[in-house]
Every structure is written in structure tokens, then in C-alpha cells.
Image (cartoon, helix red, strand yellow):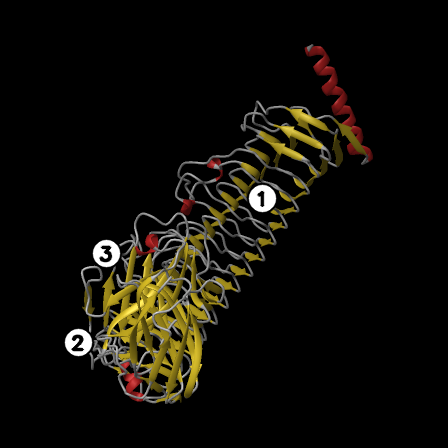
Amino acid sequence: MRKHHIIRNLFLIILLLLSSILQAQVYLPLSDNLSIPGNSIVKIAAGVYPMSDSGQDGLIQVNNVSNVVIDGDSVEADGLDSGGYLIRITNASHVTIKNFSLAQRFKYAVSISNSDHITITACNFSWNKVDSAGFINVWSGHTEALGGGVLCHQCDSVNVFGNIMKYQNDGVALYNSKNASIRFNDFSWNTSYGIRMYFTDSCHLHNNNAHHINRPYTDPSDCAALLMIVSNANLVEYNDLRYSGDGVFLGQYQYSNIPNNNIFRYNDCSGSPHNAIEATFAGGNVFRLNDCSRSHYGLWLGYSFNNTVDSNLIEYNHHSGIAIDRGYQNTITSNWISGNPEGIVLWEGSPISGYQNQTSHHYRIDSNFLSANSVAVQAENTENLRMRGNQFEKNHTAVRITGDTAGDSLNGNFFDKSLSFEIENLSPDLLEANGNIFYIADPQYISGKIYDHQDDPAKGTVNWQIYTGLVNPVYVTSPPVELSEPPSEWFSYPEIGWWLGNPQAITISWDTADKIMGNASVKLQTGTGWFNALSYRDTGSRIPRWDLGNYGYLSFWLKSQNSNLGGFQFFKVRLGSVEGGYFEYSSTGSVLNQSLNQWKNYVVPLFGSASWPITQTGPIFWHDVNYLEIYTDTYGVGYELLLDGVEFLLATPTSGIRNNETEIRISPNPGGPFRTMTIDLRNNENLHLRIFNPCGQTVSSMLLEEIPAGRHETVLDFSCLAPGLYLLYIRGQHWEKTEKIVMIP
């Protein structure tokens, strides 16, 4: 038997030598220790080969040669034990590997070292060594490589394109290499990395699929679609890096003196449970036109410097859009930053060994669009921060400055109706804020939207004059009959929370089909369920300055939708002022569970109750209420919430007409299901009708909009009511009336 094996190997060697001399293609079956000479073209015979690499030196060996082509068309190789390699290349040049139908259950399908100009194309190297648990050391070298599709160590000009390398630890791992081209490959659904780079420079990575790179049983933060450890001067573009532990993780710890100068552009890094892009201790990188949305952090750039973050989409992250701890000289320009708890946050955390003297300073934040963030820009202990030309639109707080902030300036920006403060200076330092444009032109209103020395003498002054105002406000002193009707506007401001469930944007829309009254209900959709603030604001130049002194209750209807709600949840209502203070009412019940898949009415006493205890924070007065918010928290469970019939009710309803200008008659009474209501109006009105049962519960409601002055008759349909006694409550803009309604069989 051994003699036969020796004769067979001699025959293969003779064939290969003839092939190398004649440059003709030779057909060979796959065998262990198949050594390929230089200047040869080898076609592996089609077939299925279950064969382990017992010596872990490669079934196919390409050593110390050049000009080799290995074609694996219709070849399926099974390494059986995930312990060796299909192909091992050492000290070789100009080698092409192509068309393998499958190579599985090897440690790596191909291992390459000290070689150059290697091409791998049109191969399926999937289902190789895989781990689904355990910590990954991102700083380990090639001797601790995890397994997967292709391993390169000390290689130059490796070209990997058009391959499939999935369901294993790594797609391609590059150690101490350079000038690689990795393009149009599918590395998705690996458990460690799509592409792993370690001290690897000057590569071009583009148009790869590397989405869903994750370890299902451990912290996803040690996985990444693209890992780059001390890897510089690389171009990364047009890659799909979604839903991975990190989309990109770039680490330069203790090598910060080496310039990075990587360019990341047009990559989709969204949906990461950790960071869409993380670059730490790194300098000189450009992040441009990437999607960094729906992740825990959009961009985490701790201790990084001299970076450019430009024109990225940064929406609906669960903590921060851009977060930089102890960074400096970074430029943040022209990004779209929306729907984040923190749009941009800069601060100084506890220093890391070796970086104790690095502080947060010299930022340029220009020409960004920041909308619907809880805090659009927050800077703590950040000196010489310059913000210019940014557009702050309908954030909860636009800019918050704290700590040691000497030299900060905020000039030439546009502010459009932040719900709380446009500029909140909690620092003892002076803040220059001249030449800004405010949507509302009233200086008294603007002053109320700026928190500084006049609010607290311990805080620094905000020099906000000279300014430009666009629109003179129309102050609205009475709340609308119903707040949850178009054209009013509702926004959601997410609070900071950990990623749980499927990433999903927070959306607000009008639902014209599922409603309890009027034309539409407000619909909130969120995949996170972590402290969402659903906030009312008036449209255009209309500014609420409600006088609620004569009102006693806030009434609204809710309907929640998600079978997984249950458990831990908060529900709060907040009435706030332009000066930043607010009243808050916390429900003692599980409101979302009570309204699950059904409309349910809630009435909140404005002075609080056992079911709705009230607390006050900051200055607020009943005659000057500026906004209404509804806070919900389901501890990470996404849900939908429908809100309708939001109205303030007068404190002392009576059966008479308050202004003696409106007459209402209902006939017949007692009567059957259909009644005629005759009404004389002196003014144009929106009328809100509610029907209460004897227990004080609302059983029906409707809104009659834009009823002109004069006499009108309308038929009311009470067919939903069982026989008995009811109260009909009718409210106009400045009056209300209640009537007893008796239903007879």
C-alpha cells in the first residue's frame, strides 16, 4: 500500500514538473501534502474531498515559488476537524487561487505568509473554525489568529475579491501586511470579524458585505465588521457593515504617535449594539458620508485627535450620536444628527494610564443640522470649543455647556424653537454667543431660552447680543380644544438607554384610521422603549404661554400595542415653562399595560392626586405653561403608542353657559339613540363633546371642528349607549356646559 502511494506521488510530481515546463494546465485530485511547483497551472479534479490536514501544513502547499494558478472549480473540500488549512502559501509570489466551490471545517481555508501578489477570487471559504463564546483579544498577533477564510501575515499586494467567507470567526485576517485590495466579498454572519487588520497599512477595502458580525453569547463589543489595530493610510469605502458588534473598531492605544490617516466614506455602519464607528487614541482619520445610525453610539472617538467627521448620517442612536472623551482638535462638520439622546457630547472622563495630560480642547463644530435630540450639543470641561453655522431645530435642549470651558464660542448659528433651552450655560465661564439667528424674534422670549448668570449668579454670562430674529411670535394663552389634532406638532426626544431589541428609528406620525375622536391620533413607534418623551408644540410662530389657572384636569386617550410590554415601566406627564421648570405627574399604575390593544381614557388632576402624585422642578407658574410632554419607559421593549383626545378640562364644570352667549338645546330628552342638538354660536368655534357614565368614566367623545357663528342643528348618534343616565359635556374655546342625557329603551 505504501509503495502504491509513493508511486502515485512520483507520478503527480512528474505531471507538475511537465506542467511548469510547458505552462499547460494539469488536472490533479486533491491529496495531502500536494506541493505545487512554480510556473504551473493546476486544476483540482472536481469532487467532494473529506480530508483533514493532519500536519497543519496545508493539503495544498505553495512554498518558495512564483507564478502559480490553482483552480478549484466544482471542488468541495472538508477539513473535518477545523485544525489545518486547505492551502498553505509561504515565501511565494504571483499566486492565484480561484473557483473553489467550498472549503469548510479548516482552521483557515488559506494561510499565507511572507508572500506578495496573491489573488483569491470566486471561492466559497465558509463554515471554517468558529467560536460563539469567549472574550476576543483585539491586540493578539497572528499566532493567536482565530480561524476563518483567509489569513495573511507579512504579505504585500494581496487581492481578495468576489468571494464568500461566512459563518466562521473571520472573513479575512491581515497581520503586518500592506497594499491589500479586499473588494466585493461577502463576509456576513461571522462571529468575530469580517475583516481583521493588525499593523496593516495602505489597503483598499470596498464594496464588501460584512453585516451581522457578532458573537451571540457574549458582549458584542469585542466583535466588529472591520477591526483595525494600529493600521494606517487605508481607504475604506462603500462597505455594508451593519448590525455588527462594532461597524468599525480602530484602536491605536500606546501607538498614538503613529499617524492614522485612514479614510472611511460611504459605509453603512448602522444597527450596531455597540458603536457604529469606534476610533480610540487615533489621529488624522476622515469619517465622511457614512451611516452611523440606530446603534448604541454613532461614533465613539475617545482620546482621538485631528480627526474630521463630515457629512455623516447620525440618527436614532441609543446613547450619543458623536461621543469624544478627552479628544482635541477634532472637526465636526455638515453632519445630519437627529433623534439621539445626545447629538454631540464632549467631556473629560477619568484619565487612562499614559494619557493623564490629555484634555478636551480646540474643537470646531460647524454647519451641522441637529434636530429632535434631547441635548443636541453637550460640552463638559472642553476649552476653546467653536460652534458656527449649525442649525438647531426643535431639540429639547440645543446647547449645554458645563465645567471649565474657557474660550468657548457659539456664533452665527440658527436656533428654531428648542423645547427647553437654546443655550444652557452651567459653566462659571463666559460664553460668547453673538450673531446667532433665532426663529422667534422676541428678545424676552430668547432670554428665557438662555440659562446663564441672570438665572444663577454662579453661572457664566452668555453674551447673546447682537442677534437676528426671524418671526414675531404669536403667544397663545389658552390651550387648544384638542392638542392631538393636526396641524399641531409632536416630537419624541429619547433619553439615554442601552440597546435592546431590534434597532429602529423613533417615528411620529398621524394615524387617521385608528383614532378615538377628531381627524387623527398621534402615533409613536419605537424599537427601544427607553425613556421616550412625546412632546407637544404649536406650529409656526405660535408659542404656548398657557394660563391654566382655571383648568383642573388634563385628559387623554391611550392605546398601546406590543404583546411583550408587561414588567417594568414608567409613565409620566410633564408640564414645562419657557424658563426651564416643570411640573411632573408620575402614574402609580401600569398605564401601557392597562391600555394594551384598547383605547383607555386617563384624567390627570393638575394639582396631583394619589394616582398622579405631582413634583416640581425649577421655576414654573400656572399662568405661563409652555409645553406638554408624555414620558414612557418600558425598559427596552419596543412598542407603539397611540395618543388622542388630549385636552385640558376646566376646574369647575357647571350646567350653565359661562359667557351667556351660547345656547344649546337637545331634544328629545329623555329619548332614544338619535337626538337633535340645536346650538346658537356668537363666534366660530371648535366643539368637543364627551359623554360620561354615572361612574365618571368617558364612554364616548367627538370633536366638531370649525363650526361657524350662527344657529346649527346636528343629529347626535347615541346608539352605543345602553339605557340609563349619562352626562353630556360640551366645551368651546371659552365656555363649557353639561347636560343630563336619559336613554330609554
Residue placed under numbered mark 2 in the picture: 458
Q: Secondary structure at mark 3?
A: loop
Mark nearest the camera among 2 and 1 is 2
Residue 496 in view of the camera: yes
Mark nearest the camera among 2 and 3 is 3
Q: Quadrant of the N terminus?
A: top right
| Of the image marks 2 and 3, the number of the one nearer the N terminus | 2
Q: Quadrant of the C terminus?
A: bottom left
Q: Residue 79, relative to residue 274: is it above or below?
A: above
The image quarter containing residue 188 is top right
- Give the x, y percent position of residue 223: 45, 45
Q: Nearer the viewer, residue 670 or 333?
A: 670
Contact check, label 2 and label 3, Cβ < 8 Å: no
For label 2, the crowd category at 10 Å Cα-Cα, with few meaning under 14, some 14 to 19 and many 20 or more, is few
Residue placed under numbered mark 3 in the picture: 588
The image quarter containing residue 429 is bottom left
Q: Residue 97, relative to residue 381: is it above or below?
A: above
Q: Residue 398, relative to residue 228: is it above or below?
A: below
State the CA–CA distance, disc 2 to disc 1: 61 Å
- Give the x, y percent position of residue 353: 29, 52
Label for residue 155?
1
State the CA–CA distance, disc 2 to disc 3: 37 Å
Three-letter code, disc 2: Ala
Residue 415 in view of the camera: no
For label 1, the crowd category at 10 Å Cα-Cα, with few meaning under 14, some 14 to 19 and many 20 or more, is many
Q: Judge left or right: residue 248 versus residue 493.
A: right
Q: Residue 739, relative to residue 81: is it above or below?
A: below
Q: Secondary structure at mark 2?
A: loop
